[in-house]
Amino acid sequence: MKAERTPRTDKELWRSLAAGHGASPGPVSDLDLASWLEGRLPEAAAARVEAAVASDPELRRAALELAELQGGPLPAAPVRMVVRARALIGFDAERQARRGGWFGRMFPSGPRHAFQRSAMVAMSIVVAGVGFVIGGGLGESFAQQMHGSEVAATTAANPSNELADYFTGDEL
Amino acid sequence: MTELNQIDLRALAAGNKRAWDAFVAAAAPLINAVVRRTLSSYRLGEDDVLDAAQDVFVRLCARDFRLLKTYDPARAGLGTWLSVVARSAAIDHVRRRRQATHALDDVPESVLAVEDRHIEKLKIPHGLLTERQTLILKCLYDEERDVAEIARLLKIDAQTVRSTHHKALLRLRAHFGEESP
């Protein structure tokens, strides 16, 4: 006697199958997913994203949730959220970003600042030259100081003479 | 209020404070909605929603707006891209938070569910179904979504979803020698 098979429902059939397709497709970038959600990807690229969405339950849930939110009315965000987010970028950050920090402040880019850049370069050369000259002068001064200190050292070798001179002076 | 598509992206990526403030005002409702939707199954409080939303904004402006600079308006709308980024940041926020101890009741059932691996399943041969057919069947049976939701996701009409589903099942039944119910 042949046992009669009861046809399975579509869901039962699907559940009895392993839906994995072997090698999992590569990761999908945020921009690719966004593009796919908007239906902007060409067919081949869309198929790659669809394969990734089909194989990754987390990505599938993300896609379904985001599709649900797309185009729908959005409630206003809490004021605290907006205030906190705005505080992330201050006017100081803007100035720094515009100038590019200390170096940017010294050497601003752009055609409008060509004169300022030339002046800064010229000034740097002058400062370096003066520094070189002063450095030489200091060298001489240092040599003199070294020579003088030898003389002073012989004088300072007998402090009792200085005291004697002092008291001798008082007798006058 | 400035709309998202009116934001000066160049000024924003250059760190312009006014552009940032306008961007925050325009993007906050969307980011708020995405973060709330993402965190809804985790029973987290208002502070977590605000923290996760702040994470999104931090992610956007961190390292001299590195992430924001990767956005390409030619490939996707700013709102859609932001919603993908916001969901991803919200999930990361939950993961970081779950590293600390938490009550078992706070974990959604979907996370705790364990697939019964004792049943040996028949493997669907590669190429039997198209990517779209597989995705539709997974959305219908694994995610238990309705046809309208899948149609919205794939930007096709509900009838196309039904016919794709029907064709996919015909192929499966033919391949595995199953009769239609």
Image: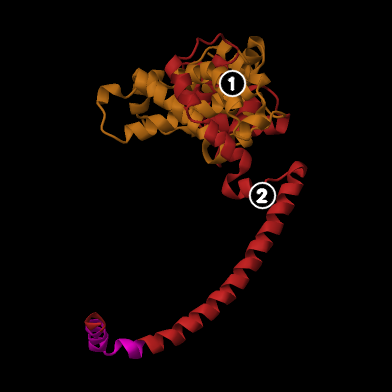
Chain colours: A red, B orange
Residue drawn at x 47%, y 22% as measured from the top left = B142
- Residue lying at 49% horizontally and 29% vertically, measured from the top left: B56
Question: Residue A160's mark?
Answer: none
Above or below residue A171? Residue B74 is above
B8 is higher (above) or lower (below) than A130: above
- Position of A146 with respect to B84 (left or right) is left
Dominant SS of magenta comes to: helix
Q: Quadrant of residue B130?
A: top right
Give the residue number, with chain letter if any, for mark 2. A107
Residue B100, picture quadrant: top left
- Camera-near label (2 vs 1) is 2
Residue at mark 1? B22
Residue A115 placed where, x, y %?
A: 75, 48
- Near mark 1 (Cα within 10 A), the count class, few <14, some 14-19 or many ≥20, is some
Magenta extent:
A153-168
Assess disc 2: are there few (<14), some (14-19) or many (≥20) residues with their C-alpha within 10 Å of its C-alpha.
some
Report the chain holding disc 1: B
- Name the residue nearer the viewer: B130 or B93: B93
Specify whether residue A57 is in view: no
Labels 2 and 1 in the same subunit: no
Is A154 included in the stretch rendered in magenta? Answer: yes
Q: Position of residue B119 (x, y in %)?
A: 39, 31
Q: Secondary structure at mark 1?
A: helix
